[in-house]
Image (cartoon, helix red, strand yellow):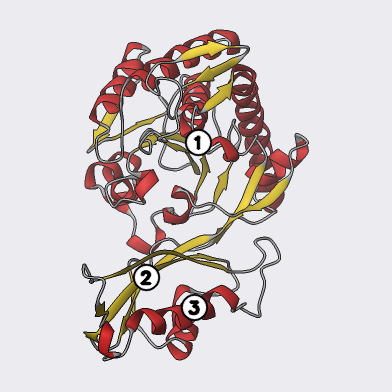
Amino acid sequence: MQEEQLYEDALGLLQSLIRTPSLSREEQGTAALIRSYLEERGVAVHQQLNNIWALNKNYSAEKPTVVLNSHHDTVKPNPQYTRNPFEPIIEEGKLYGLGSNDAGGPLVALIATFLYFYEAADLPVNLVLAATAEEEISGINGVEALLKDPGFLAQTGAAALAAEARFANWSAIVGEPTEMELAVAEKGLLVIDCTVTGKTGHAARQEGINALYKAVDAIQWFRNYQFPKQSDTLGPVHMNVTVLQTENKAHNVVPGTCQFTVDIRVTDAYTHEEILAVIEAAVEAEIRPRSLRMRATAIADQHPLVQAGLALGRHTYGSPTCSDKALLPFPALKCGPGFSGRSHSADEYIYLQEIRDGIAIYIALLKKAMHFAQTTKLKQA
């Protein structure tokens, strides 16, 4: 299929996706839409929960595998929208609509790229398309669930291997809005809930120990502390207190407990466990991490996907935002059309030219990566 037709079809798909609400955990409509779109084009499609996946027609378990992954869930519409978030409108070369930029544009561009290579008989690698759910909430029923699914493992041949070796020869392109630059590293996410305990009392009689004041002292530590080690690609660890509350409903009661939440963006200079150890030693509070799943990740500069991107004139950088890249147990390059700063914003949009260019660059990137992979293999033989 020619790239122009792929672009026109991708644009139509994206408009349909915008019309179909797909909040995280409620992606049934867009899952059905993507499945139907692929089946209409002769692709053998599989579904696991709200995750849609497919293998290239001549898939061989003996070959290395590249996963083309992006998500079809969205956040709730920003309350400052001035347009209908579910109405795809094209104006002045922009397509407006919820999820158009994050990550509808990258998703449809990757689908187009998969279709470009789908029928090829002589690919040196396998391609797996994975349009997944729950990315926006780092949910457990998205790409993480897909990679554990017995049906998926059986179809890809991974089930025949020991667990530690299943994905040894796999890598991925994760479609997120990066302006088609190469996010080779990505910060992890650690969210902690902190509970500070004091003693309740009557405010008029100056009784009790004010847990809110104790929490302020703890919050000051989070505001001012700087972890000494910095990552070469991701810079420093960043911590932000984002939620604060007490159990009080009455103005005249000194609060006995106070809870606050901290959003921590972790680099590859520290593990989650090391971060927690520092906090627990410094802060007088009960510390409860919500999850330790979202780790900082990186892909080597020597990887064929990165080398291919560099050869095409793209640039590498470390991304401060999280994606499904954090949940993949193999090297992944985050790259896609669109601009990260538009994500989750009111009146979200993507330029049509960004989608067109994204498809062309994805195709060129894979072609060049396949060439590099073959060349390296021949040198090693």
The circle on residue 345 is: 1
Q: Are marks 1 and 3 in contact (CB under 8 Å)?
A: no
Q: Secondary structure at mark 3?
A: helix
Residue displayed at 50% across by 61% down: 188
Mark 3: few/some/many CA within 10 Å (<14, 14-19, 20+): some
Q: Which residue is mark 2?
A: 260
**Residue 131, percent across and down?**
38, 34
In the image, taking residue 149 as reference, residue 180 lies left or right, namely right
Q: Residue at x 47, y 29 (%)?
A: 107
- Residue type at the position of mark 3: Ile
N-term-proximal mark, 3 vs 2:
2
At mark 2, the secondary structure is strand
* Mark 1: secondary structure: loop
Distance from disc 1 to disc 2, alpha carbons, whole Å, reads 25 Å
In the image shown, does 333 or 84 lie closer to the viewer? 84
Residue 208 is left or right of residue 124, and the answer is: left
- Answer whether residue 251 is visible to the viewer in this image: yes
Q: Is residue 192 visible?
A: no
User: What percent of the width, then of the height, locates residue 196?
Assistant: 33, 82
Q: Which residue is mark 3?
A: 275
Pointer 1: residues within 10 angstroms few (<14), some, or many (20+)? Answer: some
Judged by depth in the image, the label closer to the viewer, 3 or 2, is 2
- The answer for how far apart the CA atoms under marks 1 and 3 are is 31 Å
Q: CA distance from mark 3 to mark 2?
A: 17 Å
Q: Are marks 1 and 2 in contact (CB under 8 Å)?
A: no
